[in-house]
Amino acid sequence: MSVVALIPAHNEAARINATVCATLGVASIDRVLVIDDASADGTADLARTAGAEVVELHRNLGKGGALQAGLDAMAGVADVLVLLDGDLGETAAQAAALVAPVLAGEADMTIASLPRPPASGGFGLVKGLARWGIRRLSGYESVAPLSGQRALSRAAWNAATPFATGYGVEVALTVRAARAGMRILEVPTAMAHAATGRDLAGFIHRGRQFVQVAVALARLALGRRL
């Protein structure tokens, strides 16, 4: 089986080298593709130097759009997709724990559960909305509804894509996979990425995330493609 890691990245120069190197070090992952989402800090060059294949987008499409571009590039060769954020750094090595159950036929989609960052500034509103929406729309009780660190079998990503836009990516993946009867397994990990602070920029980010998750859930409820 061919296992391909898709890493969407926007201005991740500080961590992309470590993320790519750690991902390449996972024995079960065959190829690593970084989708550079119109970065302005050299992310693409750093990813390429670290050993990743790179797709460069000329305008910012957001996480969902970047993942879709990666899937379009790899759909013909990937049997298992691994989705990882560009800011995981060395902790991306724990992707091995996500891939193993899928390769063993024990799960169709695995989701990494991450410890709460010490500097996290959120109040849990977005996570609560996402968890409630997933339960209402699919019956699945999610521990980590917003986790972007996942591994999907071909059956799972065929059922759960195209990727939703904006910050609705994760909830849409979970709802669609659960509705399709895919076996979902949440895996505790010590993965870590940059936390959003309790400052103005952080509150704006979480507000945008809340709205886009709500829109994704509404569209799923109405049966519309995202």
Image (tube, grey):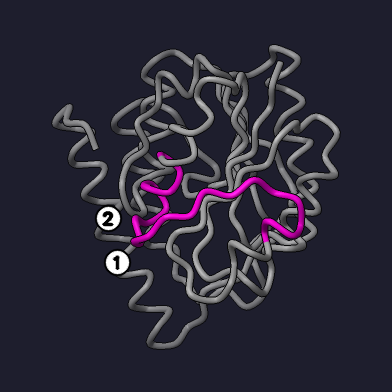
Taking the spot 36% from the left edge, 47% from the top edge, the residue there is 65
Residues in magenta?
A: 47-68
Picture quarter with the C terminus: top left
* Residue 134 locus on image (x, y percent): 36, 36
Residue extending farthest to the left is 222
Residue 21 falls in image quadrant? bottom right
Contact flag, marks 1 and 2 (Cβ < 8 Å): yes
Reading the image, the residue beneath label 1 is 208
Please state if 149 lies on the left or on the right of 223 as rendered: right
Q: Is residue 60 above or below residue 152?
A: below
* Residue 182 locus on image (x, y percent): 49, 16
Q: Give the SS element for disc 2.
A: helix
Q: Is residue 132 above or below residue 15?
A: above
Q: Which mark is residue 212?
A: 2
Taking the spot 62% from the left edge, 78% from the top edge, the residue there is 119
Q: Dot 1: within a 10 Å radius of its alpha carbon, few (fewer than 14), some, or many (20 or more) residues?
A: some
Decide which of 96, 184 is in the foreground and name it: 96
Q: Amino acid at mark 1?
A: Arg
Give the CA distance from mark 1 to mark 2.
Answer: 6 Å
Residue extending farthest to the bottom is 199
Taking the spot 42% from the left edge, 41% from the top edge, the residue there is 69
Please state if 215 lies on the left or on the right of 30 as rendered: left
